[in-house]
Amino acid sequence: MKPAERRGKNQQFGHATITFNSPSSANLVLRQGLLFMDTNYRCHKCKVEPLRCLKCQNYGHVASACTASSTTCATCAQQHDEQGDCPQLFRKEAHACVACRIGGHASWERTCPSRLKLQRALDERLESNRLPFFPTEEPWTQQCTPLYSGRVSTHTLLDCNWRQSKKTQPCQTSIADSFRPLPEAAPTRRPHTCSSPGIDWADSFQDLPMDQDPPSQTTEKSPTPVDS
């Protein structure tokens, strides 16, 4: 965890490094996350990162092999030993980077352009940096992520691998068996189109059954014979 003196005033998130005894256990956490105190945390695999000297703040060596005579602050790039008590720690405009030799960011920031350039070179050289999972016998653990395309979520890779495996499996059903043509029926009315000139709406309904009056129940009386 980051030391308390290096945490921001409004910092709400942090990170921790966890070690596992087997690659399968680590891949399980990478796939499903880590449940801690009723909260599921997303995890990603640690990569080989550029070495930064904690004495002179330059890349390529460690402090035990540094030849600098004095310690340089990783926040303001000044010569003082109390890096945790740097007076410019919470003043973003006063931060300075030793590797980039410019201001605007500190030497320890992960978005440092010099660090990102070295990280890309390591990713190109080391295949393990491009593997989001620890390789095992499972094929989905041996797929590399493309370079310079942003971080690819492990859940996205698993979903793509699952869809690809479904495509290669033989299909036992056919979609044509689910749809059967309906029997043809005789038309019940005269067809018309919008381009037909002179449509007589009365004729369009002439084939439809019309309501008819029920037959009359009265009968005609025969003439009564009259005596002459």
Image (cartoon, helix red, strand yellow):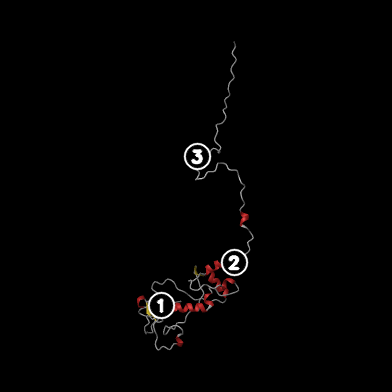
Look at the numbered disc 2 and give the secondary structure of its residue: helix
Q: Nearer the viewer, residue 122 or 37?
A: 122
Please identify, in this view, whether the residue under mark 3 or under mark 2 is nearer the observer. 3
Badge 3 amino acid: Trp
What is the residue that sits farthest to the right in this orientation? Answer: 172
Q: Which residue is mark 2?
A: 165
Quadrant of the image occupied by residue 3: bottom left
Point 59% across, 66% down: residue? 165
Q: Of callouts 1 and 2, which one flags the residue occurring earlier in the amino acid sequence? A: 1
Please identify, in this view, whether the residue under mark 1 or under mark 2 is nearer the observer. 2
Q: With respect to residue 99, does 40 lie above or below?
A: above
* CB within 8 Å, label 3 to label 1: no
Point 53% across, 71% down: residue? 30
- Marks 3 and 2 sit apart, C-alpha to C-alpha, by 58 Å
Name the spot of residue 135 as percent of width and height, x first. Answer: 57, 75
Q: Which residue is mark 3?
A: 201
Residue 175 disc label: none
Q: Which residue is mark 1?
A: 6
Q: Of callouts 3 and 1, which one flags the residue occurring earlier in the amino acid sequence? A: 1
Name the spot of residue 40 as percent of width and height, x first. Answer: 50, 68
Q: Nearer the viewer, residue 151 or 19?
A: 151
For label 1, the crowd category at 10 Å Cα-Cα, with few meaning under 14, some 14 to 19 and many 20 or more, is few
Name the spot of residue 67 as percent of width and height, x first. Answer: 43, 89
